[in-house]
Image: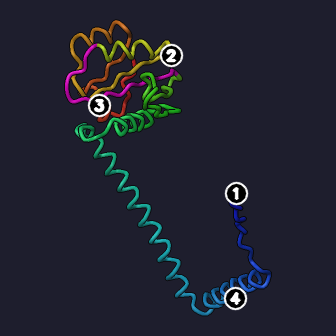
């Protein structure tokens, strides 16, 4: 049986630690002295650092605004994967005032892709269907069978980029499932108001 080598952690000798501390103290002393002798240079460096930080925050905010504007156009969902679409819906929920929003989609989720709490405290369970074609009633039936019984939904949303059939709409109405089709989703994206009953 091969003997395992014991990995020894690297230790710093007291002499090296003292030298590093002395070097840091010397650098700090030189910096203080430079500021005393050349206040203009110190002010310029400080101004540069502040300007750089402000520019970074400005660019970050601009990037966030561009992302928000990009997502305003519902066609952005057409190129998303199923998982990306779930996170997209989660962001819409948070922006609309929902709390505790969590993406839980994947195998074994039993229809609950996104969960959260409405602003009034009701539990929301969302199933996301990123489709381009028709959405049939079997999808609605399966979700209706788990949304309340298994996931304890007060509000059950089935969000799709597709076009629900008339039978799907009928089943959703009878099972108290809020069906958010492409048109309703575009309205949600534009207004920021979640389509809660």
Q: Secondary structure at mark 4?
A: helix
| N-term-proximal mark, 2 vs 3 | 3
Cβ–Cβ under 8 Å for marks 1 and 2: no
* Cα distance between the residues tagged 2 and 3: 23 Å
Q: Which residue is mark 2?
A: 150
Q: Secondary structure at mark 3?
A: loop
Residue 52 position, x and y percent, is 45, 71
Q: Which residue is mark 1?
A: 1
Residue segment shown in magenta:
122-137
Q: Nearer the viewer, mark 4 or mark 2?
A: 2
Cβ–Cβ under 8 Å for marks 4 and 2: no
Q: Which residue is mark 3?
A: 130
* Cα distance between the residues tagged 4 and 2: 66 Å
Residue 97 position, x and y percent, is 46, 33
| N-term-proximal mark, 1 vs 2 | 1
| N-term-proximal mark, 1 vs 3 | 1
* Cα distance between the residues tagged 1 and 4: 53 Å
Q: Which residue is mark 4?
A: 26
Q: Nearer the viewer, mark 1 or mark 2?
A: 1
Indicate the quadrant where residue 196 lies: top left
Q: At 42% across and 18% down in the image, what residue appears?
A: 156
Residue 15 position, x and y percent, is 78, 85
Residue 146 position, x and y percent, is 45, 15
* Cα distance between the residues tagged 3 and 4: 62 Å
Q: Residues within 10 Å of mark 1 (few under 14, many from 20)?
A: few
């Amino acid at each position: 049986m091969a003997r395992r080598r014991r990995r020894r952690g690297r230790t710093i000798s007291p002499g090296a630690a003292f030298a590093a501390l002395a070097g840091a103290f010397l650098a700090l002393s030189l910096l203080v002295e430079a500021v005393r002798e050349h206040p203009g240079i110190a002010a310029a460096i400080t101004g540069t650092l502040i300007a750089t930080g402000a520019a970074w925050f400005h660019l970050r905010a601009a990037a966030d605004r561009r992302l928000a504007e990009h997502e305003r156009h519902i066609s952005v969902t057409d190129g998303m994967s199923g998982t990306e679409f779930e996170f997209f819906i989660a962001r819409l929920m948070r922006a609309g005032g929902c709390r505790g929003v969590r993406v839980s989609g994947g195998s074994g989720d039993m229809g609950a892709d996104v969960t959260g709490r409405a602003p009034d405290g009701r539990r929301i369970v969302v199933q996301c269907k990123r489709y381009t074609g028709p959405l049939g009633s079997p999808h609605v039936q399966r979700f209706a069978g788990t949304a309340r019984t298994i996931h304890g939904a007060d509000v059950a949303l089935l969000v799709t980029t597709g076009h629900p059939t008339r039978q799907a709409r009928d089943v959703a109405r009878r099972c108290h499932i809020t069906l958010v089709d492409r048109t309703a989703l575009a309205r949600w994206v534009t207004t920021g108001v979640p389509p809660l009953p």
